Amino acid sequence: MLSPVTVEVVRNSLPAAANEMAYDLQRTSYNMMIYEVRDYCCAILGVHGELLAQNVGGVSHFVADLDVIIQDSVERFGVEFFQPGDAFIMNHQRVCGQHLNNIVTYAPIFADGVLFGFSMVRAHWVDVGGLSTGFGASGLAADPWMEGLQLDQVRVISGGEPDEQVMRMIRDNIRYPESSMGDLRAQIAACRLGERRIEELVSRYGMDDIRSSIDRIFVDSELRSRQVVEQLPDGEYIAEAAIDHDFVDRDDPVSIKAIVRISGSDMEIDLSECAKQRRGAVNSRTRAAAFVAYKALTAPHEAVNQGSFAALKVTIAEGTFMMAQYPAPMASWSTPVPTVVDTILRALSGAMRDRIPAAHFGTLGAPMTFFGMNPRTGRRFVVQSIEGGGWGGRPGEDGASASVSICQGDVRNAPIEGLELKFPILVEERSLREDSGGPGRYRGGLGVRTRVRSLVDGTWSMSMPGRNICPPWGLWGGKQGTVGYYEFVQDETSAFERVDGGRRMARSGSITWIRTGGGGGWGSPLYRSVDEVLMDVREGYVSVQSAFDDYGVVLKDETLAVDLAATETLRAKRLRDTTEGAIV
Amino acid sequence: MSLVIATDIGGTFTDLVAFDTETRAIVHAKSHTEPEDLTAGILRCLRKSGLQLEKAGEFVHGSTIAINTAIERKGAVTALLVTRGTRDVYSIGRGNRPESYNLMFRRPQPYVPRYLTFEIDERLSSDGTAIIPLDTNSVRTALRAALEGGSESIAVCLLHSYVSPRHELLVAEEAQSVAPDTYISLSHEILREYREYERISTTVLNAYIGPKVSEYISNLQSALIGEGFIGRLSIMQSNGGVMAPDTARREPVRTMESGPVGGAIAAGQLAGRLGIKHAVAFDMGGTTAKAALINDGVPEMSEGYFVGNEMSGHPVMLPVVDVIEVGAGGGSIAYVDSVGSLQIGPQSAGGYPGPICYGWGGVEPTVTDANAILGRLNPDSFLGGEMPLNFEVARHIIESNIASPLGISISEAAQAIVDVAVNKMALAVRAVSIEKGLDPRDCALIAIGGAGPLHAVAVARDLDIPMVIVPPLPGHYSAFGMLVADVRHDYVRTYFQRLDELDPVVLSGMIVEMDSDARKLMSQEGLASEDISTEQFVDLRYSGQEFTLRVQIFPEEIEREGMDDVRKRFDKLHQERYGHMAPTEAVEVVNVRLVGIGRRNAPAIEPPTATGLATPVGNRSVGFTAKSGSIARVASIWKREELAPGSRIDGPAVIEEYASTIVFDVGDVAEVRGSGEIVIRLAERAGPN
């Protein structure tokens, strides 16, 4: 009989190995996309791509889409092909379905002389040639060749021997080889660490007990998720949203439709009625949005494995933008994902009223990307930071301000002092945007505004998915949040230009404003307590004007004293005039 | 003046350990803590132990006042003065959400409201030059507004003040005239390192707890003086050293995490004395187990930590003994969850009602109950027999809550509880050793805390650690650590430069400045110059990396040979720690650090007085882990105080003492050292267990 202790040991040890891989990778990586943005994941997979463990933290949407890489590799090469000491590199979009900056490395794990599975790291490189510098080519790349270097299941190390020719070819075709080859070294070291940990585990407990434990762990995870889903009424739940455009066809919004079907403890998330694949680069091949939403609703605090998603069916039709066919451009693959997650949550908001917040700002932060050559040092540089935005108000509480999106977990902005020590810029302001949070009984969190002055000539990349036609929505009578955008000017005396996806050649002294959106409100703002509205005004989160217009609270100018009688009359009148259906 | 006294105030109990340097006698006492009058517990302990304070040359004190003031949010109304444009940096923080999938995540709640945060017109660049000179009018306006807003304390954190403190010092001058009586903390004095959010957070915490902790220390001083104390009072810090009360009043944030470090300090000195290169201090109490790595007798340090928790806590970027804690202690509750898997903790039955077998009304099975059922604890001599254990009820509850749902016997269930707890604790020990690149076969485990010796051999076996050391007084080791701690002050300067372009004049300038600060402070604290020493370090990384490794430097060596050897040591360390290195790539310096150490005369515990050959006091059946679940073996039972140096005991055996029990299995061998430690060598592992 399998000992309950062995099951617990394996349950703890598998994620511990993945977390250890992640810790080492982060500590030794060479680009901020890994050490600050945590745009990576580390995982242990079985021979058929089943997910045995994945690290906690980091970019949430990496929870999906690792299995297909192993399945493709095994199908292509056969299991006999893999040898101890091998390592592979992969970013090809026909399988990976993400921007080319996301470089996957994996290594076979052998235990007792047989192939047990693979250790894998997916991490964002700062450049893979083409237009990929920084956060990626975003909307600019019309196809994968324009985007950068494509690597299709390339064995870079055979039996412990690096293939120097392939390494040189990679090195010659990327802009920051010191950084990226350092990252490759760190990725492979992390894979080797994963191999060692699994070998140790198998040698300690034996293959049979390990396999039985893993089966048991999968069943447990599945059961935990089912226990949540079976509480929800059976039925079909639908919500729709959109982002403004795909960066190419700027008058044609990218529509999103989430259909969630619940039957007993089974859930299906059907995204097949989303827009067809696009000419612009918002395409992908990903189940990430469905996985992230499901995980957040079922077992947010537990380590993930194959069982976590066993009771979820994800349906995405081939040829739609999240299941696009190669060579559709995918350089901006992840930009719609946070909004798709929100749309799935919105579909279920009636069924899980006390567990679903209003929409968050819904973009992958506002990226700060400025690059060029510093004439003083003679070295190339890339400035990068992720500025967070506002989250939606939630049952019982205001939304958090200035936080990274649902697709980003332990992702950090770059400190002002660190940026200025390393790069020729000045960050002149980083502050919260007054009135950017959607008014509500529970207010949406605030977005951020950041002002950057360049001290040398260089290039700014300014790309965020537009949310103007569908700003972050409120729920139950809460109002929408304010959207984010960039502004740019070559010199302070001229007028700022609003930039929504694009690059600008910037002269020394140029100014860029980066603004992120706020979250939607939850419940009618007319029910927010007067004290809380007053506190928000005092703190500068809400203006006197918005207190009146949105919250129906009348403040006397200067003293900010509340005119209680006028407030009561105003709120009563507004409530009578409200025609919206559900307000809380 | 022969007495050295240490007191450790915890949430429930105040602990006192005293050492008489003439007689080498050790006294300990415990009393309950009164949250409203913390010194009362100390005075009760003194009376209980019959110690005369006028004979005390030293009084070392550790307390939770700093951390509790922060966590309970009972500090001063605090204002924050920052550079124009950075008013919201404190609340924006780093924007991260460590709980990736949690839709209801919480960010740290600032200790300063936005309306008490004021922007000053000034701006330094990253090399310290003033892009915008400081406008003193804006300072005065801000200070007045802060006072009008009811501020009792002020934190100042200006951008790049770690390079040039000039502007912060000008703010302090204005404050001296506008608000002379208000507590003030300047960020460059607290933390001279880049990263504004972390520096603001650390400085704000200092200002927030400052007035309350200062008052507490003053009250303590007068209470002690009132009892006739004329010796030196020292306050325990998070970095494992002590400092003078005046320093603690200025920088109380340095005491925030002093609670868990005492054991690691004493274990470090023990490892040093025994010449053990790598050891892990393993400290298990009622609620948690803690692990800290010790290299060459020195506990590993971490650059910072979070107050509250890592998910939504406040960063404090000050050196702290690197302690990894897991929610597995004697009182941790075992249960079978909704999918039928056995879980231990983090919920704990605490000190009261505690485990079921205490008989105080506990109804949830704990790790201690499982140990009692397995015969690993002696029901009659727990706490020297002061507290008889009754485990009949515990057996029934473990049967219904654990054994039946899992379909196993009661003893298998009890063994499973112990084993899962052991595995959890082993993960913490792993995290500070194996995951830092150490081979466990080169390590020793030093077992302390009430429950540490009971589980240490099993933890060591789980990790292939070949040796467990149980020092004398394992149950009082934390307070004992305070008795033996040195004075310690940490200094840091950010110096951002490629190693091959480093200017030795700048480097030595920084070192000289920090060195003279350290020596000046410690001589003010009453240390003789021959007892003061300093060590220098640089934080290095490959160009392009963010995280650094700390490498010790020796000014004479640099003068003689430049930075070549420093560079080589860094490559080697990187290889050991992470399994790869890049000897041809550029390396950068990020920070220069200096540690000032003031040596105190550490007391040594009296060696065992027993002589001759001890005999076991009896035998009993004890449950041990086995492939099949649990196996009962007849173990010999020994009293520790009867064991003379040189005694050798073959497992299976149990060695009992007042506040602790050692259990080891067949094939393991224990030996008593001349200095009183019990060293257990573990049986060689024979294949998969």
Image: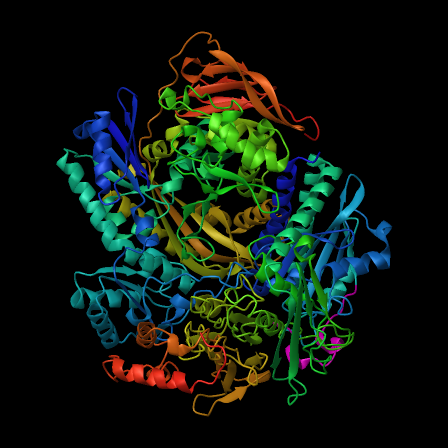
Q: Residue A123 versus residue A432: which sits nearer the camera?
A: A432
Q: Is residue A291 left or right of residue B203?
A: right
Residue beneath the point at 25% across and 67% down: B170
**Residue B23 against residue B404 in the figure, above or below:** above
- Specify whether residue B272 is in view: no
Q: Is residue A577 above or below residue A271?
A: below
Residue visible at 53% across and 42% down?
Answer: B432
Towards the viewer: B200 or A258: A258
For residue A194, say whether it is visible: yes
Is B151 contained in the magenta span? no
What is the quadrant of residue B204 in the picture?
A: bottom left
To which quarter of the image does residue B108 belong? bottom left
Residue B329 relative to residue A3: left or right: left
Compared across the picture, whether B411 is left or right of B240 comes to: right
- In terms of depth relative to the viewer, which is nearer, B188 or B337? B337
Residue B40 or residue A530, whichever sits in front: A530
Q: Is residue B276 above or below residue A561?
A: above
User: Residue B510's image quarter?
Assistant: bottom left
Residue at (41%, 80%) from the top-left corner? A435
State the image coordinates of residue A122 (x, y, percent, origin top left).
67, 60
At 75% from the left edge and 39% from the top edge, which residue is drawn?
Answer: A207
Residue A146: in magenta span: yes
Q: Quadrant of the N terminus of chain B?
A: top left
Q: Position of residue A46 (x, y in %)?
A: 75, 50
Q: How many marks?
A: 0
User: In the image, residue A171 lies at what x, y percent?
Assistant: 71, 65
The secondary structure that dominates the magenta segment is: loop
Q: Residue furthest bottom?
A: A494
Looking at the rendered image, the quarter that the C terminus of chain B falls into is top right
The residues colored magenta run A134-152
Q: Position of residue B127 (x, y in %)?
A: 41, 68
